[in-house]
């Protein structure tokens, strides 16, 4: 195996207490009481010898800018069990014939060659690597390679909890789990599949098995999940996570664009507003991440700044695709087929020459992409989707950023199990459909923070009085402290008359701003959660369910909106339902106003409500 760089050998030599030198450097036996100058001279001679005689890092893996590539990423498969909107279309992508993919033996042959030349870290990727049947065996075979220090895997986490015990025994030493949202229904919207609870179970299993840190990769996209930054950071308070916020990177073939990118500095500003004491951690050599930590938190957060502050100058990564092509840059188009040369019977030396030539052609940085970024217009919210026009509601979550710390501090039991308690519950994992989320939070933990204390307002008002006015005519919140908790459900509706031109564009999803129905749907869900902040005298309600439905009405060139909310508590949720419907209608207007301002918002009304002392209401 090729020798490691001089600096590494020097570190080993200087730390060694053995009176010999495996490199052959002359060693003087020191006697007790010798002048310290002798030791200094001896150390200087040994350093000089190592500079002159140590073999350099593999020339084949060193590019023309002196970057030494000691990190290899190997794609085990093109297949994936999710359909993330920023990664691939809903129908998937054309797959390479199985005969053209690397076999297990070919993967191990190439891995052995790279490790022999100085690679000390291999990460297995995909597609989704954990759907490959022999992934455990591959990890075990890699673990036997002398000189390989780290075997990592990047996974979407769907199969992680089931396979991780076997993978750990086989030698897996590092885990990156992709998770772009903490909202179960939004997860399904992004990945077009169910499975949020499985990902959370996988994260919990990794913590349980002692992986620290467990890295969670979150691609941040404007208009979709940038509002969850604080929620992700809150997870690191009690859990050994490294939450890695990744700047959205535009790949060929997906329908997103530079406007979706949220820069590292913008994200950092958001975090510092909540945690001014956020401190920067020292950067590791060749690291792609800028790491930070909130003092007192168990975990940390990092930023992968591929777009705004590239790390090309210290890049030490190479990639082998599932079909055996060597990529020296993620953004580059040039590839060279190692598979073809391997199957043609190329010798090890010939393969090294091919690899060395490819590495030698690696550019200083992905300049073309950066120029595109500089020329791009300012970022504005936009969402692209291929979903059907009848849009099922995106589910609600309890707001993490203000409540997570209180939830964890208020709940008893070891902190390492709280992630599972929060998302998986104490029983079997719950499955969530795309139209709703039923809260599975421990109710005892939630009750301490789910409702703001009501402001006393004197004796309870009778049914013929204005409930938000006290005896002296001043506005006041109703005291609901003495009311019993009951199941509350409310449904509200609205109609937006678009006109024929705007209606046709919405129907065909051809608006330049994006999918108007999806944006309006998400806005309605967000509005329901923020009702108490928009309507001054509304109590904060911990909603257990939100559903927002939009349906096209071609006879009226209109969009019908229906919003329903549910909670268990002492006060009703009709205001939450009405707010959701109204804001969804306003959002449709905003999305379509560039086409026509002859848009009418109307018929905003309560359809029904159940629960409470005044009885049920159903509009006929």
Image (cartoon, helix red, strand yellow):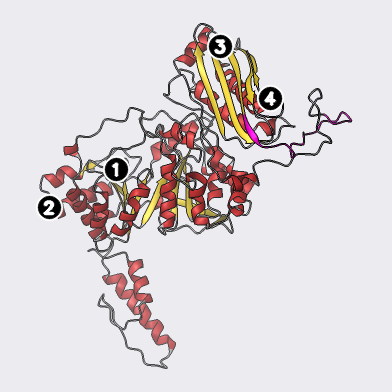
Q: Which mark is residue 615?
A: 4
Q: Local crowd at mark 2 within 10 Å, few (<14), some, or many (≥20)?
A: few
Residue at (27% x, 41% y) in the render: 77
> Is residue 447 inside the magenta stretch?
no
Q: Quadrant of the C terminus?
A: top right
Q: Position of residue 7 (x, y in %)?
A: 36, 67
- Tell me the CA gap for discs 2 and 4: 83 Å
Residue lying farthest to the right in this orientation: 472
Q: Secondary structure at mark 3?
A: loop
Q: Which mark is residue 540?
A: none
Answer with mark 3 or mark 4, whichever residue precedes in sequence: 3
Front residue of 554/208: it is 208
- Tell me the CA gap for discs 3 and 2: 68 Å
Q: Which residue is mark 2?
A: 347
Q: Which residue is mark 1?
A: 131
- Tell me the CA gap for discs 3 and 4: 36 Å
Residue at (60% x, 35% y) in the render: 543
In front: label 1 or label 4: 4
Q: Secondary structure at mark 1?
A: helix
Q: Local crowd at mark 1 within 10 Å, few (<14), some, or many (≥20)?
A: some
User: Would you place residue 43 above or below residue 387 in this image?
Assistant: below
User: Would you place residue 518 above or below residue 113 in this image?
Assistant: above
In front: label 3 or label 2: 3
- Tell me the CA gap for discs 1 and 4: 53 Å
Q: Is residue 65 visible?
A: no
Q: Local crowd at mark 4 within 10 Å, few (<14), some, or many (≥20)?
A: few
**Number of numbered markers:** 4
Which segment did they paint magenta? Answer: 469-488
């Amino acid at each position: 195996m090729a020798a490691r760089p001089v600096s590494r050998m020097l570190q080993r030599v200087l730390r060694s207490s053995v009176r010999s030198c495996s490199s052959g450097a002359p060693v003087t036996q020191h006697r007790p009481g010798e002048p310290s100058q002798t030791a200094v001279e001896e150390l200087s001679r040994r350093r000089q010898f190592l500079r002159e005689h140590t073999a350099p890092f593999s020339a084949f893996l060193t590019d023309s800018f002196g970057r030494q590539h000691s990190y290899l990423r190997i794609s085990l498969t093109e297949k994936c069990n999710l359909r993330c909107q920023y990664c691939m279309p809903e129908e998937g992508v054309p797959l390479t014939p199985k005969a053209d993919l690397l076999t297990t033996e070919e993967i191990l042959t190439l891995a052995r060659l790279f490790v022999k030349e100085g690679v000390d870290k291999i990460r297995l990727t995909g597609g989704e690597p954990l759907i490959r049947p022999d992934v455990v065996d591959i990890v075990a075979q890699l673990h036997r390679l002398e000189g390989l220090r780290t075997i990592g895997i990047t996974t979407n986490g769907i199969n992680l909890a089931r396979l991780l015990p076997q993978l750990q025994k086989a030698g897996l030493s590092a885990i990156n789990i992709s998770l772009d949202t903490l909202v179960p229904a939004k997860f399904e919207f992004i990945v077009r599949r169910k499975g949020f609870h499985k990902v959370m179970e996988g994260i919990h299993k990794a913590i349980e098995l002692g992986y620290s840190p467990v890295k969670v990769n979150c691609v941040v996209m404007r208009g979709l999940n940038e509002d969850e930054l604080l929620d992700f950071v809150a997870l690191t308070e009690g859990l050994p996570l490294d939450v890695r916020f990744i700047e959205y990177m535009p790949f060929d073939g997906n329908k997103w664009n530079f406007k979706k990118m949220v820069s590292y500095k913008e994200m950092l500003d958001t975090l510092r507003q909540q945690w001014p004491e956020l401190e920067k951690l020292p950067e590791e050599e060749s690291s792609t991440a800028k790491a930070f930590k909130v003092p007192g938190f168990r975990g940390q957060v990092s930023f992968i700044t591929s777009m705004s502050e590239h790390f090309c100058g210290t890049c030490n990564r190479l990639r082998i695709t599932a079909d055996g092509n060597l990529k020296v840059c993620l953004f580059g188009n040039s590839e060279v087929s190692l598979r073809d040369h391997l199957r043609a019977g190329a010798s090890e030396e010939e393969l090294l020459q091919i690899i060395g030539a490819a590495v030698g052609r690696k550019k200083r940085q992905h300049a073309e992409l950066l120029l595109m970024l500089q020329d791009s217009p300012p970022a504005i919210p936009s969402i692209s989707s291929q979903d059907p026009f009848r849009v099922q509601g995106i589910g609600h979550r309890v707001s993490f950023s203000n409540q997570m710390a209180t939830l964890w501090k208020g709940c008893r039991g070891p902190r390492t199990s709280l992630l599972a308690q929060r998302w998986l519950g104490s029983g079997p994992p719950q499955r969530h459909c795309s139209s709703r989320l039923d809260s599975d939070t421990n109710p005892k933990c939630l009750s301490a923070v789910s409702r703001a204390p009501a402001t006393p307002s004197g004796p309870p008002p009778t049914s013929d009085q204005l409930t938000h006015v006290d005896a002296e005519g001043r506005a006041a919140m109703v005291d609901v402290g003495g009311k019993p908790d009951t199941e509350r459900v409310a449904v509200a509706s609205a109609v937006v008359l678009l006109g024929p031109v705007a209606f046709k564009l919405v129907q065909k999803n051809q608006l330049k701003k994006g999918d108007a129905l999806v944006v309006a749907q998400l806005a309605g869900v967000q509005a329901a959660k923020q009702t108490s902040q928009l309507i001054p005298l509304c109590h904060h309600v911990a909603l257990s369910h939100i559903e927002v439905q939009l349906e096209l009405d071609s006879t009226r060139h209109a969009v019908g909106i229906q919003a329903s909310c549910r909670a268990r508590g002492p006060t009703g949720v009709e205001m939450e339902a009405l707010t959701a419907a109204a804001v969804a209608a306003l959002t449709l207007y905003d999305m379509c106003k560039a086409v026509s301002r002859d848009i009418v918002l109307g018929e905003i009304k309560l359809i029904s409500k159940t629960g409470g002392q005044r009885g049920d209401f159903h509009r006929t």
